[in-house]
Amino acid sequence: MNAIPDEAQLQEVARQVRLDIVEMLYRAGSGHLGGSLSAADILVALFFGEMRLEAGDPCWPDRDRFILSKGHGAPAYYAVLSRLGYFPREELFTLRQFGSILQGHPDAGCTPGVEISTGSLGQGLSIANGLALAARLNGHGRRVYVLLGDGEVQEGQIWEAAMTAAHYGLDNLVAVLDRNRLQIDGRTAEVMSIEPLADKWRAFGWHTLEVDGHSIPELLKAFKTCRAVKDRPSMIIAHTVKGKGVSIFEDQKKYHGVAPNEEEYRQALKELGTA
Amino acid sequence: MSAKESTRVEYGKTLAQLGAENPRIVALDADLSGSTQTHLFAKAFKERFFNLGVAEQDLMGTAAGLALGGMIPFASTFAMFATGRAWEQIRQTIAYGNLNVKIVASHGGVTVGEDGGSHQALEDLALMRILPNMTVLVPADGPETRAMVRWAASYPGPVYLRTGRMAVPVIYDDSYRFQPGKSSLLREGDDVTLMGIGVMVHACLEAATSLAREGISARVLNLSCLKPLDWELVADSARRTGAVVTAEEHMATGGLGSAVSEVLSEHCPARLARIGVRDTFGTSGKPEHLLKHYGLTAADITAAARRLCRQKAENGGAPVVEPAAAAQGKTR
């Protein structure tokens, strides 16, 4: 295991990850921009500051496990995995091409470091529960992390799994909810209300926290708090801005699933700074 | 062949034995453990049994996670809810991920009986057969169930196994060994091949006995491994006998009848009659009555075989196009 980088280093990694996301999508000509940028800080805090991993070895048996339940956030996930040394950075720019190791949505059969194929929403929390139960049966101290989208919690299976995690007291499980308030057809409040979100998770028996999902110190502190929780699963509602980091993409429903055009790409590079 | 066993009960007993032999075996259910028979495992290995409540989608996802975590999960509920309610979870997470999950679903077919059409899965084999990476098994009796469940536990990939509610005659003895992709030839014959699955295998054997009395020699195959199908034996049997009857407690479309049709069409066109449920749902009643009502008896197989053999005699060797509505009024 590597030493945990300091917060300033993590913020720099997050900036680089955002640059990679923009570059990947611009070159691919398609992909999910908004939800990748909203999740960038969460993933960086998790992978570089919280999880037990072995850099360069995606199959290290004692690793903590992560499920990207919001599978369309794949570009952010891939950018992080390449920085962990799981595959060369050049692969990022084959995203979505025929024969690429980086499919449009995560495919465990193709990408080193991806634990399970996702993309159809609502399924990752159940899988994370199964992993957490297996870790408990094995007597392994492994922790299991899952990243959910906010539109995703409109899926009924999420609430089936919410009951299961609480029923089995899965304190080795941490779910993070990327609360960026937008989904494909518009604002979550308009498409299908999900509030009061924190109250719902609390009512389902979860230890529930709310943080600024773009503050790496807040995220790291929340993860630490969750480690002390016993007999309950933890939910971190991370308040984020869809498209975070580039002013023209921020809080715009249009950029849920489109790549930047050339003008937008130039603007993004200007705002994010050079690699 | 007077002894009878229920495939679901044999599954439950075998699973409990496996639990004692291998600590990686875990079982999951969705509030039907008394019916699917996982309760036997639950009683013996409380810490390795997970009831997910009435939540089949979560059942499949949790089983997938346990498999990812190195366990060998057996997930059970009724065939209708496993394959219908949770089809997309099975497709996206278990089959696409090629995970080591065993879905053993009970209450397949109309022999569910009194619970009626909502609970009688007649589509499950079609829904599972279409999935890449999935192995689809339908045991015909107790010994075959025991062998298949043991094989499934040793095979590292997704398996769907359908068990039935009612007790069925025992065909094999305990020397039976299951081989994936292979089917068993239960009776030699020259005039027609009867290809059965599940409870219909015994009906095929009964039909072959009646046909023999009429001077028709029927070959009988148990195609219990529906996927991967033993297509070479299917094609060879069709070539030898020139006439095939398929028999399944499932829609006549999508399951065994379709699988055999695909093989015959591509490899050796032959006369074919499909015994199965014809584009309709199930209904409440006694299992035996329902089998009769839906044309799923030895007598129905015998009549179909007799008809094919007559056509063969009248028309020579070449297959003929049958007039519509030949079998049961409706064609599909």
Image (cartoon, rainbow, N blue to C red):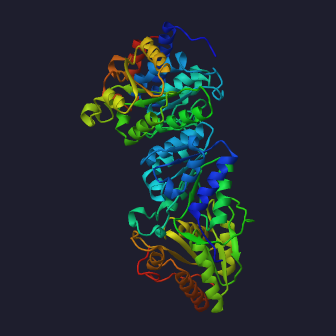
Indicate the position of residue B56 as horizontal and vertical percent values.
45, 48
Indicate the position of residue A190 as horizontal and vertical percent values.
24, 34
Indicate the position of residue B176 as horizontal and vertical percent values.
72, 65
Who's the residue at 39% across and 66% down the image?
B117
Quarter occupied by residue B210:
bottom right
Q: How many marks?
A: 0
Q: Does residue A27 appear in the picture of this structure? A: no
The quarter in which the N terminus of chain A is drawn is top right
| Residue at the left extreme of this rendering | A190
Who's the residue at 42% across and 31% down the image?
A148
Quarter occupied by residue B316:
bottom right
> Where is B196 relative to A119, above or below?
below
Q: Does residue B48 appear in the picture of this structure? A: yes
Choose between B237 and A192: the one closer to the eye: A192
Indicate the position of residue B3 as horizontal and vertical percent values.
63, 74
> Where is A216 relative to B156, above or below?
above
> Where is A223 relative to B54, above or below?
above
Who's the residue at 64% across and 47% down the image?
B19
Choose between B55 and B35: the one closer to the eye: B35
| Residue at the right extreme of this rendering | B175
